Amino acid sequence: MTDVSSAPPQGGSVTIRIQHRVQPDAVERYETWLRRTIDAASRYCGHQGVHILRPPQGSGDYEIALRFASEQQAERWRHSDERRQLIEEIQPALQQNETIEIHSGIDYWFTAPVAVSKQPVRWKQWLVTTAVIWPLTMLVPLLWQPIFSLLPWLGTWGIRNGFIAATIVALVVYVVMPRVVRLVAGWLFR
């Protein structure tokens, strides 16, 4: 296993980025193993989801991103006996040892694919982030408005802002940003 960590996580969510190069004749076996592994990881405390980038036809390069609520919870899964046994089981199907990177917060969104070795320039990160958050700041308050009308105490200054901010951040982290970055990756990492 090759372990390459980004800046040490400072609390908050953590993404474990795992890369596997699967032998061509072992893809079906690997896919079955991957489903079992994802199921096992999901039972660990703090698990917040997984995203899999499957390889294009003719390639065996998989990328798995597992999110955990904290560094400690991510490390508990990463160093568990269950994960060690799963890796030992699939090792013969891999062409090389897995590569693992640890990313905190939003760092994972702006991590280039394996073949690209540089981070995007800051102004591109700013532009993509603004383009994602701007429409959400207009839509999310409208979506919450019926609830604020039904429960006026939720609409008080501070509480209202907290609900809106939490909703926007959740949408950005789990739904919108991963898709947008993949969509503009060619431009972003150029």
Image: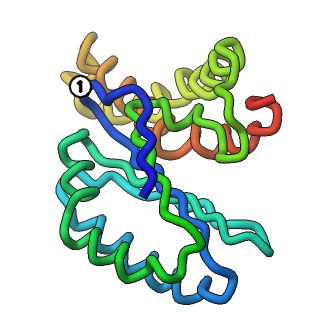
Q: Which of the 4 image quadrants contains residue 178? A: top right
Task: Identify the residue shown where x is 60% and y is 86%.
Answer: 26
Q: Which of the 4 image quadrants contains residue 129? A: top right
Of residues 165 and 150, which is closer to you in this image? 165
Q: Is residue 29 above or below residue 71?
A: below
User: Dot 1: what SS?
Assistant: helix
Task: Identify the residue shown where x is 29% and y is 22%.
Answer: 162
Q: Which of the 4 image quadrants contains residue 89? A: bottom left
Q: Quadrant of the C terminus?
A: top right
Q: Quadrant of the N terminus?
A: bottom left
Q: Position of residue 125 (x, y in %)?
A: 64, 21
Q: Is residue 141 above or below residue 67?
A: above
Q: Is residue 51 above or below residue 109?
A: below
Q: Which residue is mark 1?
A: 154
Of residues 149 and 15, which is closer to you in this image? 15
Q: Position of residue 181 (x, y in %)?
A: 66, 38
Direction from residue 1 to residue 156 in the image, left or right: left
Q: Amino acid at mark 1?
A: Leu
Of residues 32 and 141, which is closer to you in this image? 32
Query: Is residue 102 visible to us here?
Result: yes
Task: Identify the residue shown where x is 28% and y is 31%.
Answer: 12
Task: Identify the residue shown where x is 37% and y is 80%.
Answer: 36
